[in-house]
Amino acid sequence: MLQISAISACIQNYIWIFHTDSDKKVWILDPGDAKAVNTWLKHNDKELAGVLLTHHHWDHVNGVEKIINQHTPVFGPAIEPFHLTNQFLSEGDTVDIGWLKFRVLELHGHTQHHVAYLCTPDQGPSMLFCGDILFSAGCGRLKQGTAEQLFYSLNRLKNELPDDTLIYCGHEYTLDNLRFALTVEPNNASAKAHQEHCLRLTEQGLRTVPSRIDLEKRINPFLRCDNPEINDRCEHHFGKKPQNPKECFAALRKWKDNFI
Ligand SMILES: [Zn+2]
């Protein structure tokens, strides 16, 4: 049976690992830390079959060089690729890792060219591995991309994914993000309840992800830019009323960049 494990590394990153009980080979997504990956492989008596990358930032790719050999497939974005990528992906491509098949979504905004991997299995919920585009209760910063691109990417996820889609994001930022979410929407009962739930999880040393897209639509301010309370808070904070959800998104992203 397929298992999805996570290694914590770098800056609260999650390195996602796809493996089964019976197969020695594993696939790894965004290996930012070679030492952490090799320790996991050794401990679990597994070998690397291939690598999936969402984007070229160091905390997602730094481990690649020391875990691959010359035959290892390394999938990643075709444009703005990491230099060790050898399988180049664009929107709509499929990646078959044996136990799972992914459809590639190009989701720009955090970087100019970032991809996510969507799996829609015959049974059970869809799964999205989305790197630094969408976090639980938050979203990626604008590093090489624009607010407009990120707004478009997030709306795509909001509108296209089935409600029960599991969201496997690239970082454990949920509690920090919820603090911001409740600053911009203090009356959001779902966000408050989820904050309490995540506090209990982290106290027990457990992950708060994967999340689900229907939960994110209730708690994540970056997916709620048409909400009047959030719009009012942005107006109060910046002294200027966002005229539409896209402007509200840009204001929120700017606010969060400086939120301590
Ligand atoms: Zn990044």
Image (tube, rainbow, N blue to C red):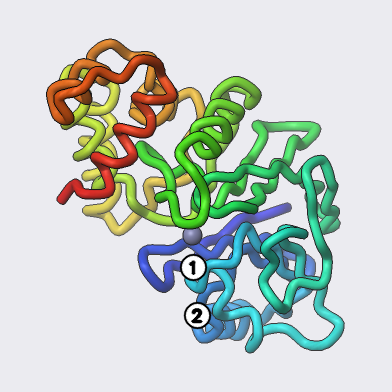
Splitting the image into 4 quarters, where does residue 231 fall?
top left
Towards the viewer: 205 or 7: 7
- The amino acid type of the residue labelled 2 equals Ala
Image coords of residue 17 (percent x, y): 62, 63
Towards the viewer: 149 or 21: 149
The answer to whether residue 255 of the structure is visible from this angle is: yes
Compared with residue 35, is residue 55 higher up or lower down, i.e. above or below? Answer: above
Splitting the image into 4 quarters, where does residue 246 fall?
top left
Residue that label 1 marks: 7
What's the residue at 67%, 60% (across, down)?
18
Count the numbered circles shown. 2
Compared with residue 229, is residue 50 higher up or lower down, i.e. above or below? Answer: below
What's the residue at 84%, 47% (across, down)?
94
Apparent side of residue 182 relative to residue 226 in the rendered image (left or right): left
What's the residue at 65%, 47% (across, down)?
116
Residue that extends furthest to the front in the rendered view of this protein: 240
Q: CA distance from mark 1 to mark 2?
A: 7 Å
Query: Which mark identifies residue 36?
Result: 2
- The amino acid type of the residue labelled 1 equals Ile
Apparent side of residue 186 relative to residue 24 in the rendered image (left or right): left
Contact, mark 1 vs mark 2 (Cβ under 8 Å): yes
Apparent side of residue 242 relative to residue 6 in the rendered image (left or right): left
